[in-house]
Amino acid sequence: MAQSVELLLDDVSDAAIRAQWDALAAAGLPSLARQAAPSHRPHVTLAARRSVDPALEPGLADAVDALPLRVRIGALACFGRGSYVLVRVLAASTALLELQAAVTAVLGPDPATEHHFGTGRWTPHITLARRLTADQVAAALTVLSGPAEHDGRAVGCRRWDGDARREWLLM
């Protein structure tokens, strides 16, 4: 998907995720630390689409006006089959689920993304690494062993245009 709406984390949570990216990279494992773009940062994708009508942005800003929002950054998890994505899952609080539902309601239905972002199908998470093999997942779990769960805050929301590699704040 080329367009997304993403939550941004408080400075402490951002630094904690970046430290995990760095630990994976230092171990020679795939890591999002390897992406150097200034706009690259830990985030939680609320919705993704092939395109987003700019006329919807005031509604999106209204949908996220409850920020900041407490979030619980939780356990490690893997998505995928054969080529894995390593993530930290966020606790699915009522407030977080309502925020995501409000954003997707503003954007309207999209059959192409319903399986990931539809009601009851969204898994709030922060990506740590992509395209890992099973052996790399095992190594990454060793590198990141120990308690890394913590309470944080989602403090902002941005729009990301993946085609133009451009971001801007909604809040």
Image (cartoon, helix red, strand yellow):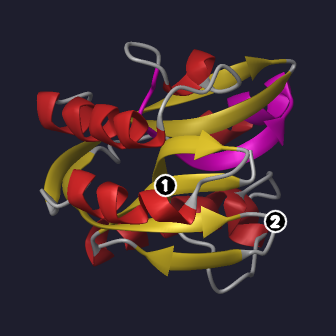
Mark 2 neighbour class, 10 Å CA radius: few under 14, some 14 to 19, many 20 or more: few
Quick check: 3 above or below 160? above
Residue 81 lies in quadrant: top right
Residue 127 shows up from this direction: yes
Q: Quadrant of residue 8?
A: bottom left
Residue 69, image x, y percentages? 15, 54
Provide the residue designation for mark 2.
Answer: 163
- Residue at (74%, 20%) from the top-left corner? 80
Number of labels in the image equals: 2
Vertical position of residue 73 compared to residue 122: above or below: below
- Left or right: residue 109 versus residue 37 is left
Q: Seen in the image, is 69 located left or right of residue 85?
A: left
Q: Which amino acid does label 1 sit on?
A: Val
For the point 69% across and 51% down, the residue is 51
**Image point (81%, 23%), residue name:** 134
Report the magenta residues as a range.
122-138
Question: Dot 1 corresponds to which residue?
Answer: 5
| Near-viewer residue (129 or 98) | 98
The outermost residue toward the front is: 55
Q: Position of residue 68 (x, y in %)?
A: 15, 63
Image x and y of residue 78, in percent? 62, 25
- Up-down: is 2 above or below 140? below
